[in-house]
Image: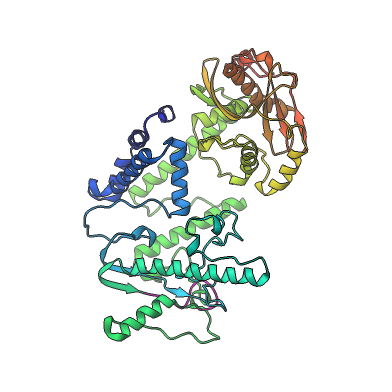
Amino acid sequence: MLRGQVGLPLPDLVNEVERALGLDIEVAARSGLDPVTARADLDAFIDSAARFAGDAEDPTLGAFLAYLKAAETEEFGLEAGRVGETDSVKLLTVHASKGLEWPVVIVPGLSFTAQKNGNPAKGSIFPSPPANATRWTANPRVLPFPLRGDRADLPHLAGLEKDDLAAFEQACAERDVREERRLAYVAVTRASALLIVTGYWWGSSGRPLGPSPFLEEVREVCAAGAGKIVAWAARPPQDATNPLLADPEEAPWPAAPGDRGHTDLSARERYEAVVEGARMVEDAMAGRVRPWAGDEGLAASERARMSAWARDVELLLAERDRGRGGDGTLVELPGHLSVSSLVSLARDPAALARQIRRPMPRPPAPYARRGTAFHSWLEGRWGQQRLLDPDELPGAADEDAADDGDLARLQDAFESSEWAAREPLDIEVPFETIIGDRLVRGRMDAVFRSRDGTGYEVVDWKTGRPPSGDDARFASVQLAAYRVAWAQLAGVPVAEVSAAFHYVRAGVTVRPADLLDAAGLAALLDGVPAG
């Protein structure tokens, strides 16, 4: 529904998204604040959308999303919403605090480890080395300094000799520290009445840190009478070990009676009950049958709970037995189906029926298993990118996708294939088409003109292994749906559209000759076996 309104003016679209998702109600219910304070950040976001729409040359949704991504990666996010004075503690980054002021400001983490040249070493907190190289000679994302408008204030690269490069890197490192000093200035000047700064010797490594030069400077000012040094711990000895790493905190579970103040009888009874339950689970996993312990000594409420558990177990076992016996429970297919659901319907109708009847969360699939890196590389290779839903990630329908760690091998294999020299008519084509009485949604990887120029060929990239036997026949349902969908989109007969899987790693293109047409897919939806 929201996708259908992307043509609205950007501020109206953002308001519609807020209304449809109920974000105003959500933040008010979760924050416990008054409505004006709770939605301050929402109002700030809407204001940003309005400013973008007024300033941008082409204020489309895609352009706004790109602007938000750039703000997140390059500008540390948008400015937070501002509200009137409230009795609260605010946790902000230094960048987000620019232009704001509070009576009391605490700046923690002023700890530092210096390199031999005095610049921040890895592990330093504030100042810290930049996460990404700021030298254009080392980071291709950084615009060369001579091309920038502020080049007069940037380090100059005198030449390409080793000494020139070393001097340039040192100048860039010193500039980074100056930028950190500017940030520190912003942080310490946010306080109108009281500033508290802290550091620490021990972090997450085996060697101690040291006080930040910014903390040392604040200490000097306090020692001169402008403030108070509450505590200053001595430097740890050279052979000292990190106490955070030397004695990791451990605790038994369940907590035994007497631990952590559990000295009462009820705590002891709970502990023994948990231990007994764990033993029963271990016995069940090992196949050991324990005698029934009975319900002697249990209260009436505990007996009722045991009866409810037993009833639930009996119902679940009965449902499992009915499923094994093939009782023929009918399930109405939903009005909207994905292409992957069509494939599941052809492969295992009972499994799809169980999923529809009782939707269950699926195990998380690692991002790399979807082969998204290869599909993204193809998009960039052909210079096209599309706005995708999470369920429509490129390659999301592939059950045997290659790990994205093999990207280089997949790229080499593709460049050796017949498709490398061909230019697609379109890529990542979304569609919604009616098959039978159901709306089927999906996304085609690529569409090419046929070799003779008289028709079309839909291609789906596969990064896994080619299937065989029944698996290949079931997989062809995906191509059949793509073929029918493109015929409807292009307004041509289905006979003028072919479809193929290209298995990139194997360098094999499979073109099934007996793909289902629209009538065959409709019959599949009606319960007639495919093929």
Q: Position of residue 330 (x, y in %)?
A: 52, 21
Q: Nearer the viewer, residue 326 or 179?
A: 179
Q: Position of residue 149 (x, y in %)?
A: 48, 55
From the viewer's perspective, is 85 left or right of 474?
left
Instruction: Describe the colour scheme in one phrase.
Output: rainbow
| Quarter of the figure with residue 283 | bottom right
Front-most of residues 79 and 138: 138
Tag count in the figure? Answer: 0
Indicate left or right for 508 with 487 as reference: right
Splitting the image into 4 quarters, where does residue 116 fall?
Answer: bottom right
Rendered location of residue 275, percent (x, y): 48, 60
Quadrant of res 463 = top right
Q: Which quarter shows the C terminus? A: top right
Residue drawn 54% across the image and 78% down it: 207
Q: Is residue 205 magenta?
A: yes
Majority SS type along the magenta span: loop
The image quadrant where one finds the N terminus is top left
Residue 458: x percent and y percent? 66, 25
Question: Looking at the image, which residue is at 69% across and 46% down?
Answer: 407
Bounds of the magenta segment: 198-208
- Residue 448: say if magenta: no
Rendered position, 155 above or below 388: below
> Can see residue 282?
yes
Q: Is residue 288 visible?
A: no
Q: For this view, does 140 lie left or right of residue 293? A: right
Question: Looking at this view, is 86 or 387 the one in front?
Answer: 387
Q: Using the image as rendered, state which of residue 380 and residue 272 is in the foreground.
A: 380
